[in-house]
């Protein structure tokens, strides 16, 4: 004779099974929604692109609690909406950038600056384009890349371009570290550059991501370097394509502009192609210059 299961016990067991099924379905729906619905903050990880031949760097300043890039503020008499790397911005009439950093060439000439190199794929291409248009520029080199590719550092110097310290390994948090750590990083980077090009002046420093702080500015100045920001940013580090980069250059480059570009840190073919596209017109409108090496 089969035992009799109380009706209330069977009903309770059935309800428990149904509850578990409902919870499982809700969990699956939530996970699917998290995958399909965009982050309401709009904060997405940067796509650095394939094809890079060296370290890949995200030129993104440290995030705030809201997921947005941490803002920097100019300390000059006039405020301006400064764009961090990855946030497009045009030129401004303000002469000083965040924490008193330099944002113009100091003359009517335009200064092209190239960050994150040298890179064995893209740096030679950039040098070739600059050579074709007889343009001198400024290269903000990363210490580990200078150490790995000293021949490219020598090529940059041999062609009359200016060198700039861009930290040892593109540490966007460098400005938040202690002065001793900052100093050691900048000295190590200068040593790698000088090992490749012993007689090349290094009188400029650019903080990765434009994430300036008072300590990093102070240490750079203590070491005889001028902190260098920018006032035209095509956000080429995001690899938006040559057409987009060229459009920003055509729209925002003006006399005295310091233009932020990249020859390493990711796939920079779009930057090379944008230069080939934009320079015929830009060179008919402006004169270009490497930043001076006597600016201390």
Image (cartoon, helix red, strand yellow):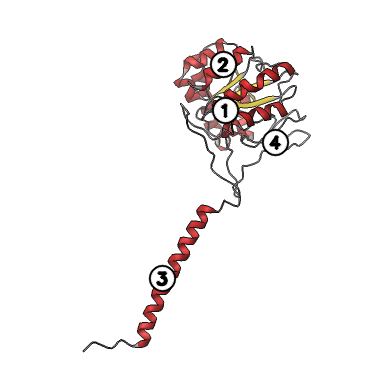
The answer to whether residue 224 shows anywhere in this view is: no
Which residue is labeled 2 in the image? Answer: 127
Q: What element carries label 2?
A: helix
Q: Nearer the viewer, mark 1 or mark 2?
A: 1
Marking on residue 126: none
Residue at the outermost left position: 1
Using the numbered discs, state the Cα–Cα distance from disc 1 to disc 3 in whole angstroms: 52 Å
Residue nearest the viewer, comparing 236 with 242: 242
Residue nearest the viewer, comparing 217 with 167: 167
Which residue is labeled 3 in the image? Answer: 20
Q: Where is residue 121 in the image (x, y as percent from the top left)?
A: 49, 21
Residue displayed at 56% across by 45% down: 44
Which residue is labeled 1 in the image? Answer: 270
Which residue is labeled 4 in the image? Answer: 82
First in sequence, mark 1 or 3: give its number: 3
First in sequence, mark 1 or 2: give its number: 2
Does the residue at mark 3 contact the one at mark 2 (Cβ under 8 Å)?
no
First in sequence, mark 4 or 2: give its number: 4
Does the residue at mark 1 contact the one at mark 3 (Cβ under 8 Å)?
no
Q: Nearer the viewer, mark 1 or mark 3?
A: 1
Quadrant position of the N terminus in the picture: bottom left
Left or right of 7? Residue 88 is: right
On the image, which quarter does residue 99 sit in?
Answer: top right
Q: Is mark 4 on a helix, strand or loop?
A: loop
Left or right of 180? Residue 15 is: left
Quadrant position of the C terminus in the picture: top right
Q: Which of marks 4 and 2 is in front?
A: 2
């Amino acid at each position: 004779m089969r035992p009799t299961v109380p009706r209330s016990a069977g009903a309770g067991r059935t309800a428990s099974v149904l509850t578990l099924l409902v919870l499982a379905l809700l969990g699956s729906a939530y996970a699917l929604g998290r995958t399909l619905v965009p982050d309401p903050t709009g904060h997405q990880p940067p796509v650095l692109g394939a094809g890079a031949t060296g370290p890949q760097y995200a030129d993104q300043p440290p995030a705030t609690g809201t997921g947005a890039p941490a803002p920097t503020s100019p300390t000059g008499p006039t405020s301006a909406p400064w764009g961090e790397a990855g946030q497009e911005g045009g030129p401004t009439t303000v002469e000083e950038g965040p924490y008193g950093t330099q944002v113009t060439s100091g003359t009517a000439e335009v200064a092209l600056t190239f960050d994150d190199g040298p890179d064995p794929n893209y740096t030679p291409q950039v040098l070739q384009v600059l050579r074709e248009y007889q343009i001198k520029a400024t290269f903000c080199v990363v210490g580990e890349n200078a150490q790995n590719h000293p021949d490219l550092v020598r090529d940059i110097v041999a062609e009359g371009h200016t060198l700039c310290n861009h930290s040892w390994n593109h540490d966007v948090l460098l400005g938040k570290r202690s002065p001793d750590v900052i100093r050691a990083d900048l000295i190590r980077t200068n040593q790698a550059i000088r090992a490749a090009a012993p007689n090349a002046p290094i009188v400029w420093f650019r903080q990765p991501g434009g994430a300036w702080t008072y300590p990093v500015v102070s240490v750079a100045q203590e070491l005889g370097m001028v902190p260098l920001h920018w006032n035209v940013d095509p956000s080429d580090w995001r690899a938006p394509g040559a057409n987009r980069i060229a459009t920003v250059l055509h729209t925002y480059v003006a006399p005295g502009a310091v233009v932020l570009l990249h020859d390493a840190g990711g796939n920079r073919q779009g930057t090379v192609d944008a230069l080939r596209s934009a320079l015929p017109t830009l060179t008919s409108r402006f004169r270009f210059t490497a930043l001076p090496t006597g600016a201390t």
